[in-house]
Image: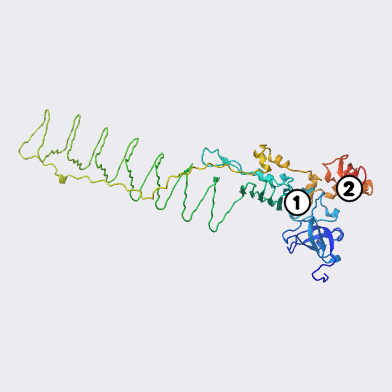
Amino acid sequence: MNDYGLGIKDPLWFVGVIENNDDPRKEGRVQVRAFGIHGTNKDVETEDLPWAICIHGGYDVNIVPKTNSWVFGFFMDGRGAQQPMILGVIPSQMTKVMDPEVDGWGALPTNNGRVSAEGSDPESFGQPQNHRLTRAEYVQETYVLQQETMRTKEVRMAGGDGTRTWSEPPSAYNASYPSNRVIHCGDNSIEIDSTEGAERIMIWHKSGSFLQVDTAGTKCDKSVSDKYEINDRNQHVSVSGMSTVTIMGNSYVYVEGNKIEEIGGDLQQLVHGNYMLSVGQQATMQAGNQVQIRGADVKMEANVGTMSIKAEKELQTEAGIGWYAKAPFIWSEATTNMNIKANNMNLFATTEMNIKSADLNIIGTGTADMRGGVLTLGSDNELHIRGTTVNIDDNVNMANGDAATAHADGDIATSEPSKGATSVEAPEPVAVGTSIAPQDLDSVGSDGIASQDDGGADGSNQPTVTVLAAFTQPERIPTITEEEKAQALAQQDGSQPDNGDETVDDDEWTIEDHKAAFGPPDANDIVFNDVYEGKYQAGDIVQWDGKDAIIEDSEDGGYYIRPLSGTLT
């Protein structure tokens, strides 16, 4: 390069096309074919083109023009034309299948062509280079359809009869050009949409995971695979309304330290299987009012120490069949009266039974029987036996001092006092909640164009594809056949089309075919490749360059266009 100091003398301006954007130095450079300078690929092959530096308004080497993009710039070395610098991309659109061998410019990508050559792929024929999401056209060909068809619906909520559900909000996309700014690479995209009444932010991953914030501020964060959230310090979560969590699998919560839960209203835990509460130290259950425990069978065990049951007023126990109490020692004490009542009562002691009272009355309304191997009745004063008739059989010794002495007070075992139950040691229960349980608020969903298939604002409930297809969908010009699309996709991937001994070129109506059929073309004839097949037929009147023209066919099956008056350019 000549020494021009800091300036560039006599720059050579050009318009060209990007043929390779895979910079081996990874500096964001591209190889460009400058029209009128590098000729066709037969004159200068793609690999021999000079590497161009790309300039953007803000320097960013991550923004690399796509292969086959039209660009403009200048050669810093002037007529030497070996040091190109690209200043910008010229908006353009492809109207035919890319064929560098025939066209003499452009390149078929050898790897990941859908990304590196986006805009010249078959799906983009007849479309501007800015994204469909930016233009709000052909929305059904974007992620919006996938987002809508993958929505999670009717997720069951806890409690009630199982009929309460919630659903994922529909897509909030309802953009209008040019309010939606789109950054995309392949099937991944980021949108910042300022469309009035439909403002939103959207981050979309090709797997179907996304983060959406709609115009109402409703945020939907969806992961179609695993999700991880890591906090190295504290986490604070505040929910002003209702919180709903539905887990289709198992749930595991581990707390290294303490856990405190405070509930201003009621707590319900509905366990449809087994429930186990295991506590390493003391467990306390306390209620300011009543505690109820019920089960088909209820078992309580103090397997080490004492079980204490205490009632401030009455302790009531009842059994439908039997009541059993068993212990090495049993104490039962009434500080005033004790009442024991039964249809039949049996008191049995294997060794000795002692009954003592200040006054002891034993009355049998029918017959009272007292019997023993030796029966002793004694009194420190008087002993009275009274009856209308007293019968004493066999031998009677009277007044000779032979009667045995009854047990003295000290000889009779005295009943021991019972022990009182131990009070529960626990803090006072929390105060009764005075707040009114809040009413559940309805969830707010998004109201983009796809919401019309889910009872949206117009209540149409149309199928999603129908809704999206009807959303600002202009005609594509031109269209191509499925065969041509397959051929182009195969070329884009670097593979060869399976077409026998023919190539895609042989099936097209080329300039040479036109010459052979009609002679050299003039200004009144324009070659019409069969990429239009299926959209137009011979005899159709079309608009071309603002003029009426007619489609005519050739004997070889191709097509050409001829103006009805004047000339075409």
Residue 527: image tag: 2
Q: Sequence order check: which comes first, mark 1 or mark 2?
A: 1
Image height check: is 238 above or below 388?
below
**Direction from residue 413 to residue 512 in the image, left or right:** right
Q: Position of residue 347 (x, y in %)?
A: 24, 38
Q: Look at the image and tell me whether residue 360 can be seen.
A: yes
**Direction from residue 547 to residue 51 in the image, left or right:** left
Image height check: is 468 above or below 111?
above
At 68% from the left edge and 42% from the top edge, which residue is drawn?
450
Name the one closer to the observer, 251 or 162.
162
From the viewer's perspective, is the residue at label 1 or at label 2 nearer?
1
At 81% from the left edge and 52% from the top edge, which residue is drawn?
98
Residue 130: image tag: 1
Q: Quadrant of residue 555 in the image?
A: top right
Residue furthest left in the image: 400
Q: Position of residue 211 (x, y in %)?
A: 63, 50
At 76% from the left edge and 57% from the top edge, which residue is drawn?
65
Q: Quadrant of residue 541 in the image?
A: top right
- Colour scheme employed for the rendering of this structure: rainbow
**Direction from residue 182 to residue 403 in the image, left or right:** left
At 73% from the left edge and 42% from the top edge, which residue is drawn?
471
Amino acid on which disc 1 is placed: Asn
Q: Position of residue 29 (x, y in %)?
A: 76, 62
Q: Report, in whole angstroms, how far the alpha carbon at label 1 lies from the one at label 2.
A: 28 Å
**Direction from residue 200 to residue 414 in the image, left or right:** left
